[in-house]
Amino acid sequence: MTTNILRILCSVLLLSLFSCQSSPEKTSAPPNVVLIFMDDMGYGDLECYGHPTTRTPHLNQLAAEGIRFTSFYAPAAVCTPSRAGLLTGRYPVRNAPHNFGPESKTGLPIDELLIAEVLGEAGYATAAIGKWHLGHLPPYLPTARGFDSFWGLPYSNDMILPWCPWLTEADKLHLYQDSTIGEEIGKNQDDLTVRYTEQAVQFIQEKKDAPFFLYLAHSMPHLPISTADRFKGTSVAGPYGDVIETVDWSVGEIRQALAASGQAENTLIIFTSDNGPWHNLPERMLQDGVEPWHTGTSGILRGAKTTTYEGGSRVPGIFHWPGVIPAGQVSREMATAIDIFPTLLRVCEAKLPREVALDGHDLLAHLKGESASPRTDFFYSKGKKFEAIRQGAWKLRHTEAAGMELFHLDRDPAEMYNLAEREPEKVQELWQALQEKAAEVGAETYPAEMAETD
C-alpha cells in the first residue's frame, strides 16, 4: 500500500513539473513581436469592426484567436506624433507634437528612448519596414534609433509634388536601405504593400533562430492609395477596399511565414493604426486621381484624422499570442498604443537602461483575461495642446471652435449629445484633471476663461 501511494505521489509531482515547464510564458525562447502599424486606417475599415462590404478574413481570424479592443486609441490623430507615442510609450506632446517632412532639419529628439533600443539590449534582432516619419536625416533614421535594419520610406507617401505644393521638383520620394537612399518611388506606388510584405517575410525567415522585433509600418491606406494589379477590382468596396484587402493578404502572408518557420506559437502579433481616416481633404490632395471617397470610415464615430473627436484617435486594436492571450475576447475597456512599450518590456523581460517617464501601462494581465485594463484615462493631443480627456465613460473636449463639450461615450459613442450644461460638476472635475496632466507633460490647453460654464 505504501509503495502504491509513493508511486501516485511521484506521478503527481512529475505531472506538476511538466505543467510548469510547458507554460506559454516559460518557453525555451523569448517571444517574438510583430507590430503592424497602419496609416490612416479608420475604426470601421475592417470586417471584424463592422465594415459591411470589405473582406478581411485574416484579420478576422487574428481577432477571433486573440483579443479585439473597441476603445483602443492611437497616441494622436496625425502621423508623426502617433508614431512617436507608439515607439516611446509617451504622450507625443512631450517629444514630437508635429509632423516631420522632406523640409525638416530635425526629428524625434535624440535623447528619447525607443522600444527598439531596449529590446536590442535584451538580445532581440530588430527591423523597421515601411514608413518611418520621425526624421529623414541620418541621426534620426531607424538604424540610429535602435533598429538593426530599415527598408522603407522616410515619411508619408504623399510628400512629393503635386500633393505637397510647398515642395520642389528636387524633393523626391526614395526607398531607404538602412541609411542609404535607394530607388525613387514616384506617384506609382502600386507594389509598395507587397514589397513591404516580402521584406517582412524575408526577415522572419532569416531570424527563425533568434528572438526578433519586427515593426511593419504600412504606408497604406494613406492617400494617394494604390495596390498591385492582382488586387485591383477584387473588392466591391472599390479602390479603397482593394487596398484594405491587400493589407489583409499581407497579414496572412506574415502568419504563414511564422508558421513555416515554426515561430507562430511564440510570437505576439499586434495590429493597429496611427489615426483615423483622412476626411475633409484639402484641395491639394484632390488631383492626379485622388478622389474624396478614397478614404476609409470611422464607423459610427464622429470626426476623423486631425480631430480630437473619437474618429480621429479611436482605431482598430488587435493582440494575438497563442497560449497566452485567450481566444475570442472583446475588450470594451480603454487601451492605447502608448501602452505597447511597457507591455513589451514585460513580455520580452527587458529592462529600461535609464529612468524614463512612461505614460503607458502594462496590458499583459488584461490581455490574458486576468484583470481589468490598467488604463482609466486618455488624453487627446493636437500639436502641443491637450484638447480632450477621457475618464471612464466621460469625455471632456475643449476647443476654440466648439467650446466646451462633454460626452458620455458608453451611451453616446458617436458624440452627438453635449452634456456640458447639464453636468457642470463633471466638467470641472475633468477640466481639473486635464490641467494637471498638461502641467505634468508640458502640454498647453486653451485659455482657462474659455472653460467656464454657467
Image (spheres, helix red, strand yellow):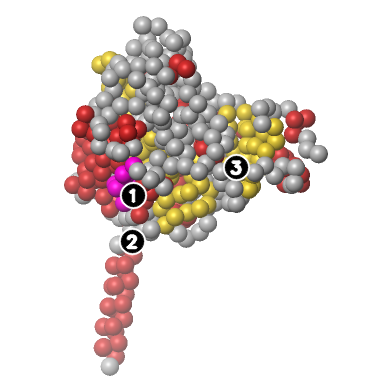
Q: Secondary structure at mark 3?
A: loop
- The residue that disc 2 covers is 23
Dots 2, 3 in contact, CB < 8 A: no
Q: Residue furthest right?
A: 454
The crowd level at tag 1 (other Cα within 10 Å; few <14, some 14-19, many 20+) is some
The crowd level at tag 3 (other Cα within 10 Å; few <14, some 14-19, many 20+) is many
Distance between the Cα atoms at labels 3 and 1?
A: 27 Å
Q: Quadrant of residue 32?
A: top left
Per the rendered image, the range of residues in magenta is 54-61
Quadrant occupied by the C terminus: top right
Q: Is residue 99 left or right of residue 9?
A: right
Which mark is nearer the camera, 3 or 1?
3
The crowd level at tag 2 (other Cα within 10 Å; few <14, some 14-19, many 20+) is few
Going by the numbered disc 1, the residue's amino acid type is Asn
35 vs 186, nearest the viewer? 186
Dots 2, 1 in contact, CB < 8 A: no
Residue 451 part of the magenta-drawn span: no
- The residue that disc 3 covers is 415
Q: Please give the name of the residue rendered at 26% of the width and 44% of the height, measured from the top-left corner.
A: 252
Residue 187, position as x, y percentages in the image:
31, 17
The mark found on residue 60 in the picture is 1
Q: Secondary structure at mark 1?
A: helix
> Disc 2 or 1, which lies upstream in sequence?
2
- The secondary structure making up most of the magenta span is helix
The mark found on residue 73 in the picture is none
Q: Quadrant of residue 14?
A: bottom left
Q: Please give the name of the residue rendered at 57% of the width and 26% of the height, measured from the top-left corner.
A: 383
